[in-house]
Image (tube, grey):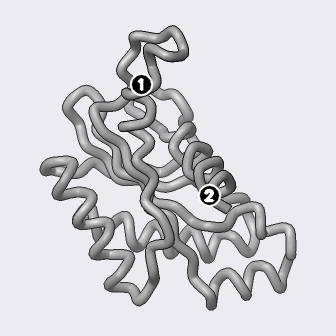
Amino acid sequence: MRKFLMAAAAAALTTPAFADGHGAGLATTYDFDGSFEDATFAVESAIVGAGLVIDYVSHTGEMLNRTGADVGSDVKIFEAADIFLFCSAVLSRKVMEANPMNLAHCPYGIFVAEREGKVMIGYRNYPEGEMQEVQALLDQLAREASDN
C-alpha cells in the first residue's frame, strides 16, 4: 500500500504547470502569498475543514533533495514540496460506480511546492466526464487554501 501511495504522490507532483510552461495543462496551480509552511497549513485546514481525512502526506521535495546526489544530479528542483493525499467516500463511490477504472485516479492529491522563491498550491487535472466532479472539489479546496 505504501508503494502505491508513494507512486501516486510522485505522479501527482511530476506534472505541475509551472510558470516556465513545463507540464502546462496537466495541473492547475494557484500562487500562494506566504511561506511554504503557511501554505501547507492552509491546505491541511481546507481538506480537514471539508470533512475529509488526509491519508498520507508525501514529502516529495525532501526526498528529491536527499537523493539527488545518489542518482547523479545536482539540480535542486524544489526548495520544498509536499503532497496531501486523501479520498472522498461519497465522490469516490459515485465516480467508480460510473466507471470502476476511475480507481486509477484515487487517492486524490493537492500539492504545495516552493520553487525559485515562489509558493504554489495545485492539483492534477482529471479527464473529462465524471472525474470533473472530483476536479471541482480539488479546485474548491486549492482556491480556499490559496485565497483565490
| SS for callout 1 | loop
- The residue carrying mark 1 is 20
Q: Is residue 148 visible?
A: no
Quarter location, residue 62: top left
Q: Residue at x 44, y 30 (%)?
A: 64
Q: Position of residue 34 (x, y in %)?
A: 13, 50
Q: Residue at x 41, y 73 (%)?
A: 140
**Label 1 packing within 10 angstroms: few (<14), some (14-19), many (20+):** few
Callout 2 amino acid = Arg
Gap between marks 1 and 2, in whole Å? Answer: 32 Å
Q: Position of residue 99 (x, y in %)?
A: 86, 75
Q: Quadrant of the N terminus?
A: bottom right
- Number of disc labels: 2
- The residue carrying mark 2 is 2
Q: Residue at x 35, y 81 (%)?
A: 48
Reply above or below: 127 against 69: below
Q: Quadrant of the C terminus?
A: bottom left
Reply above or below: 57 against 97: above
Residues 19 and 35: in front is 35
Callout 1 amino acid = Asp
Quarter location, residue 39: bottom left
**Label 2 packing within 10 angstroms: few (<14), some (14-19), many (20+):** few
Reply above or below: 124 against 45: above
Reply above or below: 75 against 129: above
On the picture, is 34 further left or further right than 32? Answer: left
The mark found on residue 103 in the picture is none
Residues 140 and 113: in front is 113
| SS for callout 2 | helix
Q: Is residue 2 visible?
A: yes
Q: In front of the other: label 1 or label 2?
A: 2
Q: Position of residue 122 (x, y in %)?
A: 42, 53
